[in-house]
Amino acid sequence: MGGRRGVTSQASTVRGLLILGYTIASRAAVLVSTLIIVAPAAVAQAQDGPIAPIAAVTLVPHRAVYELSLDQTRGDSQISAVRGRIVYDFGGNACDGYSLEFRQLSQLESGDGKVSTSDLHSTTWEGGDAKKFKFTSQNFVDENLVNAVDGQAEHGATATAVDLTKPEHKTLSLDPAVVFPTEHMVRAIAAGLTGKNVLSFPVFDGSETGDKVFNTLTVVGHKIAPNSHQHDDAAANEPKLANVARWPVTISYFGGDKAAESGEITPDYAIGFELYQNGISRALSLDYNDFVVTGKLTSLEFKPVKPCH
């Protein structure tokens, strides 16, 4: 994230967090018990073809706070410290759709002592049937607005139509196979439940300039045993998570025409996290190639469930 990358990586983090709980899913990430919202039956697309539909995935409305810090640097990275916080507020249900209020405030310090502050606000909504997606965001760097995005997307039979009003009026016709953030997360959970470990598909989340599609490679590991992978975080002693399945997940994002093929092409960036079956996420790792940021879950609030009518 040295220099210009320090600005653009903040929008990339939104994509990661959307799948984590909103979801990347997004968002989303995402960043995502015993509280139940019934989502539509999930069908995950793996590299070797679709897997069979499974029982409905359940998502829980919640508010999570993650504290950010620098984990490591690589190569000639100029980043010497990262401090910040992500507030991730997810709600809704399968009837009304799923909403996400997301804010990330970050300070990046370079080796010469220069500090840059970014403040990213994002609001998204995705239909419970994963057919419609609305998104808006503003990104401030050192209190100056550097970009704003506003638009919506809808799946059709032959294309996914995108209508942008910011940063400029534009319409796009995308591949009908693109996946929105919440559906991405649901597919990752479905893969964990059915034992699939590799998913590959294009994702559209409205981040950055609102007109980009990223090819993704999602790897879902074996289910984590309840008493292993212990963390000193807000989920550690949460009784509502004690018997909820979780999996280690890594998502690699490839921009442009890069194919999401493991081991052949370096991704633009990758995120890692532990994903609970209800969409809550912990132990974030945001890898931007020349440096890695970790996100510790420091606060977790379960919100009231609004039943479908």
Image (spheres, rainbow, N blue to C red):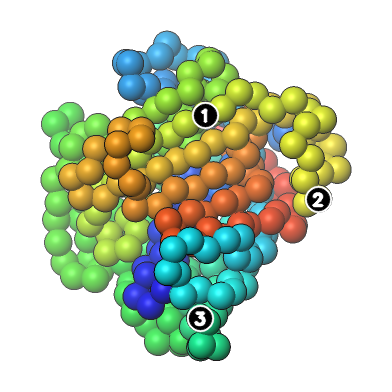
Q: Which residue is mark 3?
A: 110
Which SS class for mark 1?
strand
Q: Is residue 251 above or below residue 36?
A: below
Residue at 29% x, 42% y is: 265
Task: Write the residue at 52% across / 54% down.
Answer: 286
Q: Position of residue 53 (x, y in %)?
A: 44, 14
Question: The residue tagged with tag 2: helix, strand or loop?
Answer: loop
The three-letter amino acid code for the residue at tag 2 is Asp
Q: Quadrant of residue 70?
A: bottom right
Q: What quarter of the picture does the N terminus occupy?
A: bottom left
Q: Is residue 226 above or below residue 134?
A: above
The answer to whether mark 1 and mark 3 are in CB contact below 8 A is no
Dot 1 amino acid type: Val
Q: Which residue is at the front of the view, 275 or 33?
A: 275
Residue 49, x across and y down, in percent: 32, 16
Number of the label disc, if any, that sits on residue 232: 2
In this rendering, position of residue 241 left or right of residue 16: right
**Which SS class for mark 3?**
strand
Q: Earlier in the sequence, mark 2 or mark 1?
A: 1
CA gap, disc 2 to disc 1?
A: 23 Å
Sequence-earlier tag: 1 or 3:
3
Amino acid carrying label 3: it is Ser
- On the image, which quarter does residue 63 sit in? bottom right
Disc 2 + disc 1, Cβ < 8 Å? no
**Which residue is denoted by mark 1 in the rendering?**
220
Measuring 40% from the left and 43% from the top, which residue is drawn there? 252
Q: Nearer the viewer, mark 1 or mark 3?
A: 3
